[in-house]
Each structure stands twice: as structure tokens, then as C-alpha cells.
Image: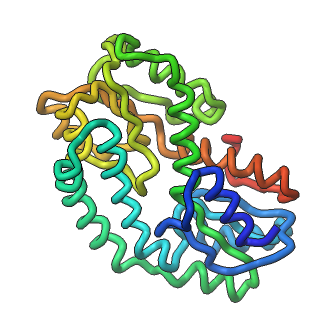
């Protein structure tokens, strides 16, 4: 395979038509038979790939380039997910505005060039595939919840998701951060695959518009504290690393069918 085919495979599995802002082919490559795959890739991972005899490196989080600088624009996907949950578009757009601005300011000074340039010097093809893998995982999570209804408990929701091997093996376990595992789930929303978690504003908006149980893969303490100090629903936090590997591993199984041997930096596969 080549880097273009690897990217296209991820887009097909995710149901995307175009490469999102947080994903990029940094260094092109052909005849890829063995790839190092890691959530975070820097110069150390490039050197590890060379030592292991890999033909390319696949990063999950943007390893540099435009994906690192402009990837935050994928946060706009929260609008579509909020609308799917019944939130009016105007309300959804207002909910994403504060954190979108923070993300832009946060990434503007990033060292976007170091890792891609190192990959070029080392002649190692490098690809970042972020939200396609996250969307693959989100779809798998939604499929796992089929058959549950508003009378199911929060524990039922967490248990269904926890059946995936990635969550069973993970050291960081699924946690009910707000509400109770014994509570009725009510309307369920899976808020994943939109660059990063929606924080306080987006969670509050879900709860104010009829969602009883919300799933994030991580949340900051400040956001959680604000939510806990006002009327809220149930918040399940799945764990960052296991959630990332859920979608990555599905992509890797497809790449294996196409002749690419993945070497991963985790045992969550």
C-alpha cells in the first residue's frame, strides 16, 4: 500500500468523503508493508520505527503540519452531533464558540514543523489519522448500544461499551463522573470524534435539551466541577487511550487485510 491508500481506507471506514482538518499525509510513501502505529508521534517514535524496520509511521494525534495547526476546526462537528440530539442549530453554534476560540489560541504557537521535517530527513513516510479513527470508534460505540432504551440504566450503557477488548484491558476504567450508575439513562448521546471533548458548555447544552446520559472520552476537572455545581444529567467518561485505540484497531485490521503489518506502541489491541 501507499500513504494515500492508507488514508483512503480510514476515510471509507469512517464514512468521510474528504480528509478532515486534523488528518494529513506529511511524508508520502509507497510499498508500505510494515508500519509503526502510535497515538502520539515525535522524533523518538520515528527513530523507533527505523530501528524496527518499519516502512512508515501512522500517528493518531496530529504529528505536525496543517493538521496540528488547523485540526481544531474539526471541533465544529459538535454542531452536527448536538443537532442529532435535538439541539437547535443556533444553540449548538453558541455552545461550541468559547472552546473553539481557546483551541485556536492553544494551537497557533505549536511547533508544527519539527516531526514532519524529521520524518523527511529520515526518509520515513508519515501520516496522521485522527478524527477518522475517532469516528470509526464512535460508530462502533453506537452500534454496541443498540437495543437499550430510556429505561435502561447508566450501568447498562457503561457495561455495553465496556465489552470491547480495549476497555477491558485498559488501566484507566470507564467512570460515571456525574450522576449514578443506578439511574435511568434517559436519552443517550455519544459525544466523540469532534477533535476533543466539548467541555462544560457542550455538556450543559446536551443536558438542557433532554439528554439524560452523555458520554465523553475525557473531561477537565474545572469543567466537571462546574457541571457538578448545577443541575445536570449523567456523564460517563470512557477513558482517552482505550477510546482512541478502539477506532485505530479497527483500521489496523483492515490494513492487515491489505498487506500492511502494524507494529503498535500499546498492548490494547
Residue 48 seen in the current view: no
Colour basis: rainbow
Quadrant (top left, top right, bottom left, bottom right) of the C terminus = top right
Percent coordinates x, y for residue 37 in the rendering = 69, 59
Q: In the visual, does 212 lie left or right of 175?
A: left
Q: Position of residue 152 (x, y in %)?
A: 40, 13
The residue nearer to you, when weighing 100 against 225, is 100
Q: Nearer the viewer, residue 150 or 246?
A: 150
Q: Is residue 109 shown left or right of residue 251?
A: left
Q: Quadrant of the N terminus?
A: bottom right
The percent coordinates of residue 138 (x first, y second) are: 51, 41
Who's the residue at 24% across and 55% down the image?
Answer: 96
Choose between 49 and 194: the one closer to the eye.
194
Q: Can you give x and y, in whole percent of width and height, for residue 142 in the image?
A: 51, 33
The answer to whether residue 264 shows anywhere in this view is yes
Task: Look at 46% across and 50% down and name the residue there.
Answer: 193
Q: Is residue 231 left or right of residue 162?
A: left
Q: Residue furthest left?
A: 230
Amino acid at each position: 500500500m501507499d500513504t494515500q491508500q492508507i488514508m483512503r481506507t480510514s476515510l471509507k471506514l469512517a464514512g468521510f468523503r474528504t480528509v478532515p482538518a486534523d488528518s494529513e499525509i506529511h511524508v508520502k510513501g509507497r510499498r508500505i508493508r510494515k508500519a509503526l502505529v502510535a497515538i502520539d508521534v515525535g522524533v523518538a517514535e520515528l527513530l523507533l520505527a527505523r530501528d524496527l524496520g518499519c516502512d512508515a509511521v501512522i500517528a493518531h494525534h496530529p504529528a505536525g503540519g496543517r493538521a496540528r495547526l488547523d485540526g481544531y476546526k474539526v471541533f465544529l462537528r459538535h454542531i452536527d452531533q448536538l443537532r442529532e440530539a435535538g439541539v437547535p442549530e443556533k444553540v449548538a453554534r453558541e455552545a461550541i464558540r468559547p472552546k473553539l476560540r481557546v483551541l485556536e489560541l492553544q494551537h497557533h504557537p505549536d511547533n508544527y514543523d519539527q516531526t514532519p521535517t524529521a520524518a523527511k530527513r529520515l526518509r520515513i513516510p508519515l501520516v496522521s489519522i485522527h478524527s477518522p479513527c475517532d469516528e470509526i470508534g464512535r460508530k462502533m460505540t453506537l452500534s454496541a448500544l443498540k437495543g437499550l432504551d430510556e429505561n435502561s440504566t447508566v450501568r447498562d450503557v457503561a457495561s455495553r461499551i465496556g465489552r470491547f477488548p480495549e476497555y477491558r484491558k485498559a488501566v484507566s476504567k470507564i467512570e460515571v463522573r456525574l450522576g449514578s450508575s443506578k439511574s435511568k439513562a434517559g436519552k443517550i448521546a455519544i459525544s466523540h470524534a469532534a477533535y476533543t471533548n466539548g467541555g462544560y458548555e457542550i455538556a450543559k447544552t446536551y443536558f438542557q435539551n433532554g439528554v439524560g446520559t452523555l458520554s465523553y472520552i475525557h473531561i477537565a476537572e474545572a469543567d466537571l466541577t462546574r457541571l457538578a455545581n448545577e443541575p445536570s444529567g449523567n456523564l460517563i467518561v470512557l477513558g482517552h487511550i482505550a477510546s482512541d485505540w478502539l477506532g485505530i484497531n479497527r483500521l489496523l485490521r483492515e490494513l492487515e487485510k491489505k498487506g500492511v503489518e502494524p507494529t503498535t506502541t500499546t498492548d490494547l489491541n
